[in-house]
Image (spheres, rainbow, N blue to C red):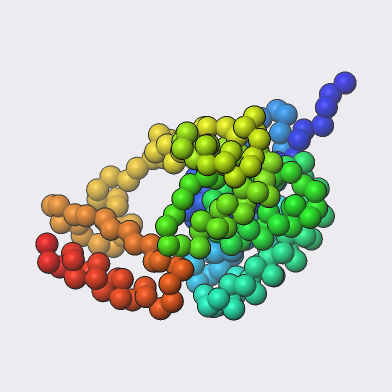
Amino acid sequence: MQTQPKRICVVTGTRAEYGLLRWVMEGIRQSPVLELQLIATGMHLSPEFGLTVEAIKADGFQVDRKVEMLLSSDTAVGVTKSMGLGLIGFADALADLQPDLMLVLGNRYEIFSATAAAMIARVPVAHLHGGETTEGVIDEPIRHSLTKMSHLHFVAAEEYRRRVIQLGEQPERVFRVGGLGIDNIQRLKLLARDEREAALDFRLASRHLLITFHPVTLEHNTSAAQMDELLAALAAR
């Protein structure tokens, strides 16, 4: 007697997170015993941030549900209201899709809303990249909260595995699988230099440096000053 494939519902809210989830989603889609369900939310649905849900579709994935929750405000009130809208939207989506498992990654507030809704709906949750720590940002308490609401844990390193177990999770449910970014590095087709310049509409110098900046989100109104210090340090080199 043939068993029904298990429905695995993946939630993605941003390009960065989708880049890590993409190959996991592909593996689920190709599995004969699993059925991929996909919920897009957050920045994916915002024209302001590039409407990146279209990039997901361009990769050949079917988006089963869209949960609109992003308000045009990044204030504490705006983000909290977005989380509330997300709870409502994910409650409806889960009731419709009836997944056997929800798969989430990371520490963003969209994923917090999705996981909280799954917890109430009695849908087991698998969490990727738990146990990590980020000083000075709201990511850390959200990430650890996701750990406590999840049932299976797939972590990137032994240190993170120990931290998840320290949070009270059962060791047999915590799996060290490495960083998902490695899959992307190995499989992603990289642009040649001229293709990269054309895509960016920017001519690169013979030597160049890419800088990323993450604000300290637990402080109030300090991001501009932090960026000024970063730019001053770069200008002094």
178 to 86, vertically: above or below: above
Residue 183 image-quadrant placement: top left
Q: Is residue 117 left or right of residue 19?
A: right
How far across and down, in percent of the image, does residue 213 sit? 34, 62
Name, please, the residue furthest toward the right. Answer: 1
Q: Look at 77% across and 33% down and name the residue there.
A: 5
Q: Look at 80% across and 53% down and name the residue there.
A: 121
Residue 56 shows in the view: no
Residue 228 shows in the view: yes
Q: Is residue 204 left or right of residue 156?
A: left
203 to 227, vertically: above or below: above
How far across and down, in percent of the image, does residue 33 sit? 73, 29
35 vs 11, nearest the viewer = 11
195 to 84, vertically: above or below: above
Residue 92 image-quadrant placement: bottom right
191 to 6, vertically: above or below: below
Q: Look at 50% across and 63% down and name the residue there.
A: 138
51 vs 181, nearest the viewer = 181
Q: Look at 26% across and 74% down and name the residue there.
A: 228
